[in-house]
């Protein structure tokens, strides 16, 4: 079974983002630091066109720093500015503001030279679902704006929130629907919660998780489940081992409790039981990119 998308739904979301984009000078694209390439919108440049962009690797606290640093380097080589953040704990958020000011310094200097008093920089957050957009906005506001107390009875429309005297942020993020033609990317997006579980073949996703763990984080998996599998073992065999350790056999044709094991694997990933891991393996994906281009 393949993960399918609803083009109508996607088109509407993209249209909304495009409308909001007209209003801003700079875009903060949030990606998940555990899969910066898979959660990055490949068509961002097309959508955002000539605006300045900063790619924010959020959830940096959950990733394997060594692997993720390769992706930082990758995006920087492509000309992007990259900032690491942990929005949940409010770490490094002001770095985003500093970088935005740096990015727009030239534009502002040009206006000043022409005698125009520069208006505040306008920014917005975009990204696929569940990468931490709302958390990021809320934390950034709390850090920088005094008295954003909710006023009861006032229906909140789209608002500009002043982060400091030079920069404003749109209070609602732009949601980009993930776009992918590669099923492996779809499975990673499912693991990080960007795609709803009810449209995802979770059996495939969990076997794929085993494959990724087997290749890069075998010890983490062996330690968690107290198993002793090797990278040469088949994924289904590994799933069987986990099922055997964790669940009672259910008898009949369906000896092992695969349903519970599938749920367990996905839940264990989403609750960081495997430790700090990065799903996008740089060498694997870049080799693939090179061979696709040939
Ligand atoms: P959105 O759909 O992009 O707006 O994502 P949310 O802001 O709703 O966040 C999704 C989940 O990720 C929530 O459970 C957040 O608490 C969590 N989250 C957001 N940022 C971080 C982060 O930097 N680190 C960690 N560990 N969790 C985060």
Image (spheres, rainbow, N blue to C red):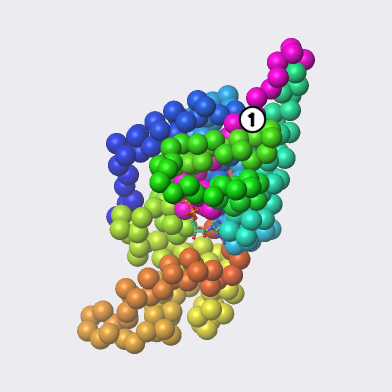
Q: Which residue is mark 1?
A: 121
Kindly tell me whether residue 63 is visible in this rendering. no
Pinpoint residue 21: horizontal percent, then vertical percent.
50, 29
214 or 247: which is nearer to us?
247
Magenta segment boundaries in residue numbering: 113-135
Say if disc 1 is inside 8 Å of ligand 1.
no
Residue found farthest to the top: 114
136 or 238: which is nearer to us?
136
Please tell me whether mark 1 sits on a helix, a strand or a loop. Answer: strand
Residue found farthest to the left: 252
Label 1, residues with CA under 10 Å away: few <14, some 14-19, many ≥20: many
Residue 120 is a magenta residue:
yes
Pinpoint residue 184: horizontal percent, then vertical percent.
44, 52
State the quadrant of the N terminus. bottom left
- The picture quadrant where one finds residue 241 is bottom left
239 or 196: which is nearer to us?
196
Residue 22 in the image: above or below residue 181: above
Q: Judge left or right: residue 66 versus residue 59.
A: right
Total numbered labels: 1
Q: Judge left or right: residue 99 versus residue 216.
A: right
132 or 177: which is nearer to us?
132
Residue 3 is a magenta residue:
no
Pinpoint residue 155: horizontal percent, then vertical percent.
40, 42
What residue lies at 53% left-to-right and 79% top-to-bottom?
Answer: 224
Residue 212 in the image: above or below residue 120: below
Q: Judge left or right: residue 61 versus residue 11.
A: right
Residue 233 in the image: above or below residue 163: below
């Amino acid at each position: 079974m393949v993960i399918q998308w609803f083009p109508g739904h996607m088109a509407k979301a993209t249209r909304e983002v495009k409308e909001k984009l007209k209003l801003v000078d700079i875009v903060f694209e949030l990606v998940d630091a555990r899969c910066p390439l898979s959660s990055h919108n490949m068509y961002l440049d097309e959508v955002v066109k000539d605006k300045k962009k900063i790619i924010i690797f959020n959830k940096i606290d959950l990733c394997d720093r060594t692997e993720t640093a390769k992706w930082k380097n990758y995006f920087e080589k492509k000309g992007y500015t990259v900032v690491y953040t942990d929005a949940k704990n409010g770490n490094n958020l002001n770095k985003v503001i500093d970088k935005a000011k740096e990015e727009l310094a030239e534009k502002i200097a040009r206006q000043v030279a022409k005698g125009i008093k520069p208006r505040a920089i306008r920014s917005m957050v975009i990204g696929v679902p569940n990468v931490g957009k709302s958390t990021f906005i809320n934390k950034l506001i709390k850090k920088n704006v005094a008295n954003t107390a909710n006023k009861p009875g006032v229906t909140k429309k789209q608002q500009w929130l002043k982060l400091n005297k030079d920069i404003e942020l749109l209070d609602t993020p732009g949601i980009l629907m993930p776009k992918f033609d590669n099923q492996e990317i779809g499975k990673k997006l499912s693991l990080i919660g960007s795609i709803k579980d009810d449209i995802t073949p979770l059996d495939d996703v969990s076997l794929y998780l085993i494959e990724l763990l087997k290749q890069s984080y075998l010890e983490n998996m062996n330690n968690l489940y107290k198993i002793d599998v090797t990278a040469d073992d088949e994924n289904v065999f590994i799933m069987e081992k986990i099922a055997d350790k964790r669940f009672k056999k259910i008898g009949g044709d369906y000896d092992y409790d695969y349903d519970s094991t599938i749920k367990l694997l996905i839940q264990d990933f989403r609750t960081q039981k495997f430790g700090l891991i990065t799903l996008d393996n740089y060498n694997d994906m870049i080799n693939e990119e090179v061979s696709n281009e040939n």
